[in-house]
Image: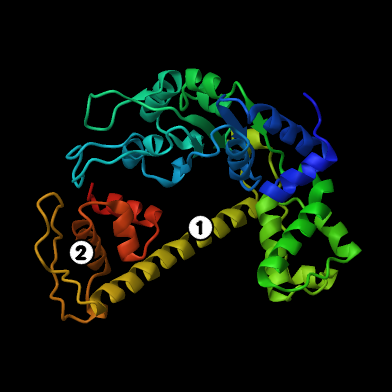
Amino acid sequence: MSTPSRQLIRQLATRFGLIGESPLMVQALSRLLQVAPTDLSVLITGETGTGKEVFANAVHELSGRKRYPFVSVNCGAIPETLLESELFGAEKGAFTGSVEQRKGFFESAHRGTIFLDEIGEMPIGTQVKLLRILESGEFSRLGSSDVHKVDVRLVAATNRDLAYEVRQGRFRQDLFFRLNSVNIHLPPLRQHSEDVPVLVEHFGQRTADKLGIAYEGIAADALQHLGTLSWPGNVRELRNIVETMVTLEQGARITQEMLERYLPEPTDEPIAPMATALVRVNEAPRSSSAMEADMAMLYRTLIQLSADVSEMKSVLRHLLSMSVDLHEPAPTDIRPAAVAPPAETPLDDLQLATLERRAIETALRRTQGNRREAAKLLGLSERTLYRKIDDFGLL
């Protein structure tokens, strides 16, 4: 495998944001340049925040398929009950709420590239269909026995140890072998901290350019301190911190004092390597710091739930202000809500769950079951809408 020249590395940085001159990153970039022009399937591995989707996009753009679609799918963000229909499509009436024929992501990516992020989250049953489409290009929509053919290149990514998942029976061995023929491993930032200076310069200058301000750089002691951190969120965490500092400080020179105001509180929790970070076997009694970390995670989860509730309340107020008829009869393909409060009842006196369900039913009815359009109508992310549909049993 030939090593890319420094000029080529700079070109990759400028065009795709692939930053890194350390031996580990040069190795990953070399593999990228080697495999991109081919039609081989690619598996990109690495911890969360290492830049797997950026690499996947570069694989597509450096291939002969760059004139055709690049479709990115987060397998972990779509409920298991919907993933198969989202990937392969569904016929009208294939399930409750399916009021029209729908193309799946594979059909949308025809002649292009499909990127399946978090492929380790994919259910075994869906893995069987994925293997079939990789081997023959053939698939069937949900609710149909008709065979369709598609020409798609697959790039997959995971932060899981798929070899371990295979041993545990959660991932098919034949699919793993099919994907792992070409592997690009992205190292965690703590293993190539020598790239921190070029990453800081890139993110700082890019943010300043977007804001139309001057970037005055970073002090040597602050830069040295950044290089000593463990970066559990990897490049994404570093990027977020640099972008925040440059934005709020209006491009002022980053000093050690400034840095301390923006860095998260340090933790004594050790960073485990990727292969073992997600699995604990025969673990010892948990330390107080680990318990504190668990409590922090629980607290963040509760905050997210609270944000979801606030988001739904905002949507409901918007719908009510537009005189959306929440108490009209529900369609036959969606189960009716148990409570149908009158529209003139004040919002604070209504049960939130009832209003949520009514709003979603109304949006689905008005978009003829099109979930993407329903999410836009409600002002929700698709992921939130999918979860709410699943919670209310509106499948």
Which mark lies nearer to you, 2 or 1? Answer: 2
Image vertical order of residue 94 relative to residue 147, above or below: below
Residue at coordinates 88% horizontally, 66% vertically from top-left? Answer: 219
Q: Quadrant of residue 312?
A: bottom left
Mark 1 residue type: Leu
Rendered image quadrant of residue 89: top left
Quarter of the figure with residue 261: bottom right
> Between residues 173 and 303, which one lies in front from this camera angle?
173
- Front one among 125 and 108: 108
Give percent across and percent down for residue 375: 33, 59
Residue at 30%, 64% in the rendered image: 377
Q: Is residue 265 visible?
A: no
Can you see residue 330? Answer: yes
Place of residue 340 in the rendered image (x, y in percent of width and height, measured from the top left): 13, 68
The colour mode here is rainbow
At 31% from the left and 65% from the top, the residue drawn is 378
Disc 2 residue type (three-letter): Arg
Q: Which residue is mark 1?
A: 298
Q: Where's the N terminus, which quadrant?
A: top right
| Between discs 2 and 1, the one toward the N terminus | 1
Q: Which percent across, then down, holds residue 176?
A: 53, 23
| Residue occupied by mark 2 | 358
Q: Residues within 10 Å of mark 1 (few under 14, many from 20)?
A: few
